[in-house]
Structure formats: structure tokens, C-alpha cells
Image: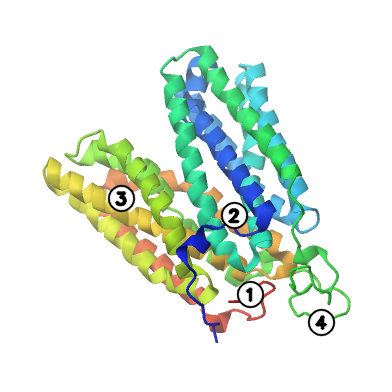
Amino acid sequence: MEPTRSRVPFVRRLAVPGGRDGRLMLVVAVIDKIGTGLWTGAATLYFLYVAHLSVAQIGLLMGLSGILGIAGPPLAGRLADRFPVTRILLGAQLARGAALLALLTTDDYALLVLFSALGALPDRASSVLTKLFAARVAGPHRIRYQAIQRTAANIGWAVGAAGAAAALTVGTTASYQALLLANVASYVVIGALTLRCAEPPAPSRVVAGQSSPTGTPRTPSGHSGAPAKAATPWRDRRYLAFTGSEIWLFLDDSILQVGFPLWIVHATDAPVGLAPLVLVLNSVLVIALQVPLSRFGETRAAARRLLVPIGAALLTGGVALAASAGGGPWFATGAVVLAAVAFTLAEILHSIASWELSIALAPGEAQGAYLGVHGLAQSAQRSLGPVVVGIAVGVGPFAWPVLGATLVAACLVQHRLVRPTAVAEPRVDAPAH
């Protein structure tokens, strides 16, 4: 039976779990996103106006970088099961800064591709390492920590993007270089802060049969004796299938970032200025709702139940986007806004469910390796998502309900995969309320 959850006061829910280290890593996340927001909006323009690359060359550069970046999450997860996660995270942060700084040293296309690809690898790895640190330091309160962290990260991203917009009004080579250097500086700062974080207990690197300082069993079974052979996600069919379904459910990112702007411009009578406002609305809703809604996914069973409203929101968003092509400006605007709200709600709920299920389904002795494999879902979506969304835009209104129904099917598949009878019950960090 699932333990009874007492209602947690909202003020307590705003407190950051994990003590001092949890708060430090939250600051790391905010500074990281500020730096990323500063550079992301300027990266394409830097390659265009400073490095003097063609649009085709920029597209190839980013595509090749994305392909190499896919290897980051599983590599980072594997290393985190063997070495301190804070030290690996520090290395990833410094590698990101070094690769970015190297862009200033050349305008040779081959070297720019190489440096961008080398930066993509630790960039994707750092997201998994941050998640793993949060899962270990926050323990049973990991969902609340994730919600607070995601809210803070969105605020940081917005601050960075606003700073980039102001700097880009200058439009000089020096302004682009300044944004790049600001992001490099952010990596140095978060590296220094990461050094101040204590290493959280790791079930995969402790002696079997003993307990961690937080009372967490050293092995999944909790028995003394020689450590059991570590599990591998590559032979866990259920976890691989779960990760495969996650690729589809992460599509909300490409739909919001790529699909909405293209659809608004090419298929509706809504004003073009609505496109950036959709992203503003998305950020506002995430900041406002992420923490309050996190209480609905604090256990594996609760996270599984969220898959039903996630599917409903995705289907609603698809139908609303299709409808937006059939009316005048006011109707189209209303339909687009409804679709944006629906997809954002799906994004918020899925981030909660995905975080909990990806950890709950991972055995403690191979937690890093499993979360690394799960990180492949987001990496794959970043590469494949824009293609899928671009096809939907090209096909026309009928494609959106079909895509929505496909995402509902992915929710149903995942709902079955994570059912209680299909998952081993012992947990190394089960919530205790």
C-alpha cells in the first residue's frame, strides 16, 4: 500500500530541501540558466555575423553538435556510479566553459564544429548530473526540489534572455563576444559553487548492508554481504521502453519552441507578434504552477496517475492548434493561447512524473547509469523533435490531432509500463511521510 501523505503547508513547500547543499545547487542552476539565456539567443547570430558562416553551415554545425551531445547523459551517469558526482559535475561545467571560450580563437569552420561538439557533450551531461545530485541530496523530497529548481531556472533563463536582447540591440562584434564571455564566466562561478557542495550519499558506491547518514540502505535488498552485481539499464527492457516513450512525451518542447512560431506564421490569421508571447506565457505558467502542482507526483503511484491528465492536455493542445487554422484573427489567437496553455500544463505535469518515475524505476546500485540512459530521451527529442514538428506544420491542421493522439498513446503505453505489478517494490529512498 502507498503511504498516506499528510498535507504540507504551502510555506513549507517553498523551503528548499537538501539543506545548505540543496540551496547552493539551486543557485548553481539559476546562474547556469542566466548564462545560457545570455548566449543561446546570440549563438546563431555570432556564427552568422562574427564567424561569417552561411545558414547551411550553421545548421550542420548545430546538428553535428547535437549528435555528439547524445552521448553525454549515459556517459555522465555511468561515471557518477563510480566517482563523486560533484567532481564530475565540476569537470563538465569547466569543459563547457573551455569549449565555448575556444570559439573566440578561430573562424575555421572545422574547428568551430569541433569546439561546438565538444561543448555539447558536457552540456548534456551536466543536466543528468544535476538531476542525480538533486535526487540524492533531497531524498524523499526530490519532487519538491525539482519543482523549485525548475521554477528558479525559468526565472534565470528569462533574466539571461532579457540581457541578451538588450545587448543584441548594439549588434557589434564586441557585443556578441561579450555575451559569450559572460556565459563562460557563469561556468567559472558555478564551478566554484559546486566545489563548496558536499558529496551526497550514493547507494552505488557504498558498502552493502550498512546505512547512509540519512538511513538509506546501502543496497536495494538491505542485506549484508558482498555487494550485488550492478544492474545495467541496457538489459532492462522495461526501462528502455519507458525511455522510448519519454522521447514522445518530451515533444512538448519542440512543439512550443518550433511548432508554434511556424504554425502561427504559416497557417493562422493570428498576429505574428503572438509567437514570442507564447513563450512568455509558457514561462509565466511554469513559474506560477510548477511548485504548487508538484504535490500531485510525490510518489511512483501518484506520478503514474499524472499520465492521464498529461494525455488529455496533449490531445487538447493538438485539437486547439488544428482549430486555430480555421477562423479569423481573434478566433485564431484564442485557439493558439488555449493550445499553449494545454501544452504548457502537459509540460509541467510531465516534468513532475518523468522526474519521479525515472528515479523510482532505477535500482539504487546503478542509479547514475539508469538516469543517464533516461537522459537520452531529451537528447533524442532535441534532434528528432524539430523534424517531427516541421512535418506536422507542413501536413496541415489534420496533423495536430493525429500527433496529439499519438502522444496519448505514448501516455497509455507508459502508464502500463510503470504499473505497480510490473515494478519491483524495494526502493532505496522511498518517501516517508
Indicate which label's residue lies in the foreground, 2 or 3.
3
Q: In terms of depth relative to the viewer, which is nearer, 403 or 431? A: 431
Quarter of image, res 118? top right
Q: Which disc is residue 223 wearing? A: 4
Residue at the farthest right position = 226
Between label 1 and label 3, give the one nearer the viewer: 1
Query: Count the marks: how many?
Result: 4
Q: Secondary structure at mark 2?
A: helix
| Alpha-carbon span between mark 4 and mark 3 | 50 Å
**Label 1 secondary element:** loop
- Image point (64%, 28%), residue name: 185
Residue neighbourhood size for the residue with mark 2, other residues' Cα within 10 Å, grouped as few (<14), some (14–19), many (≥20) = many
Q: Position of residue 93 (x, y in %)?
A: 68, 39
Q: Amino acid at mark 4?
A: His
Q: Position of residue 56 (x, y in %)?
A: 47, 26
Crowding at mark 4 (Cα within 10 Å: few <14, some 14-19, many 20+) = few
| Viewer-closest of 158 and 359 | 158
- 90 over 75 or under it: above or below: above
Q: Residues within 10 Å of mark 3 (few under 14, many from 20)?
A: many
SS for callout 4? loop
Per the image, the residue denoted by label 2 is: 375
Q: Residue at x 52, y 82 (%)?
A: 4
Given residues 248 and 423, the one toward you in this image is: 423
As drawn, is 145 to the left or to the right of 351?
Answer: right
**What's the residue type where badge 3 is placed?**
Ala
Question: For residue 392, which numbered disc appears in the image?
Answer: none
Q: CA distance from mark 1 to mark 3?
A: 35 Å
The answer to whether residue 70 shows anywhere in this view is no
Which residue is label 1 attached to? 430
Q: Return the residue at label 3.
A: 340
> How far apart are the alpha carbons under marks 1 and 4?
17 Å
